[in-house]
Each structure stands twice: as C-alpha cells, then as structure tokens.
Image (cartoon, grey):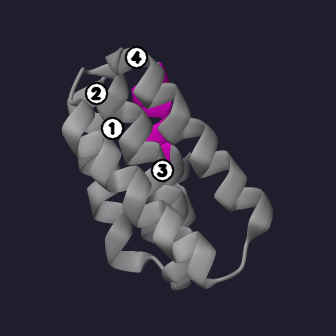
Amino acid sequence: MASKVHTSTASVKYKFWSTHISGMALQYSGDMIGAEKAFLKSQDFACELSLSFNLQHLGKLNVEVGNYKLAEQQFIEALAIREKLKQADLVESTNRAIRGLQKLRT
C-alpha cells in the first residue's frame, strides 16, 4: 500500500512517509537490507524534521544488526536536528535511544 501511495502521489511529504513506512514494515518483517534501502530512499523526500525521524529509525535498524558505531552517528545527527528545531519531546526520545545504545555496549 505504501508503495502505491509513493508512485501515485506528487506530494513530497507523502513520498517521504510512504517510503519511510515501507522501511519500517520491512524492518519489522526482518528484511533489514530492504528496510535500509527504503529508509535511505526516503531521505530524498525529507524535510529537516522528517529527516530526524528517518535517522532515528536508521539508528534503531543499525542497533538491531549490531552496527553500533553507525547507529550512534545517526542518533547524534537526529538529536542535533531535533535540538535545533526545539522539539523537546523528540530530543528526549533520541536521548533515550542513545542511553539504550550505551547500555548495550557495556
């Protein structure tokens, strides 16, 4: 369904979210390679705030596959965007992800 939305809409916002949601669905179904490709493709349609969501989800994906260094970089990038945009609730969400990653590493 998300793929159909992506191909049938002219809205950049809808293209981002349909592709991003495809990435989430692929990740939850265990297709990490497909998920990563969808997440990276959705960046072509991202505004600054949606890019922060994208980076956070890419970070989560990389935690799942054990690529902690890349996950940390993605979380830090998401955090910087969210702090810049003064999105306190999203900043806290990213800080929780970073703390969780730190716990995994110890």
Q: Which mark is residue 9?
A: none
Query: Could you tell me how far apart the alpha carbons at marks 3 and 4 are, in whole angstroms?
Result: 17 Å
Which of these two is toward me, 56 or 84? 84
Magenta range: 22-28
Where does label 1 land, which residue?
35
* SS assignment for the magenta stretch, majority: helix
Q: Is residue 51 above or below residue 66?
A: below
Which of these two is toward me, 104 or 90? 104
Query: Could you tell me how far apart the alpha carbons at marks 2 and 4 are, in whole angstroms?
Result: 20 Å
Nearest to N terminus: mark 2 or mark 4: 2
Res 9 seen here: no
Query: Could you tell me how far apart the alpha carbons at marks 1 and 4 are, in whole angstroms?
Result: 22 Å
User: Furthest-right residue in view?
Assistant: 89
Where does label 2 land, which residue?
32
Where does label 3 land, which residue?
56
Residue appearing at x 60%, y 71% in the figure: 82
**Element class at badge 1:** helix
**Element class at badge 2:** helix
Query: Could you tell me how far apart the alpha carbons at marks 1 and 3 are, in whole angstroms?
Result: 13 Å
Q: Please, what is the three-letter code of the amino acid marked with disc 3?
A: Gln
Q: Please, what is the three-letter code of the amino acid marked with disc 1?
A: Ala
Query: Measured from the top left, where is residue 50 in percent x and y?
Result: 55, 70
Circle 1 residues within 10 Å: few <14, some 14–19, many ≥20? many
Q: Which mark is residue 104?
A: 4
Q: Please, what is the three-letter code of the amino acid marked with disc 2?
A: Met
Which of these two is toward me, 14 or 28? 28
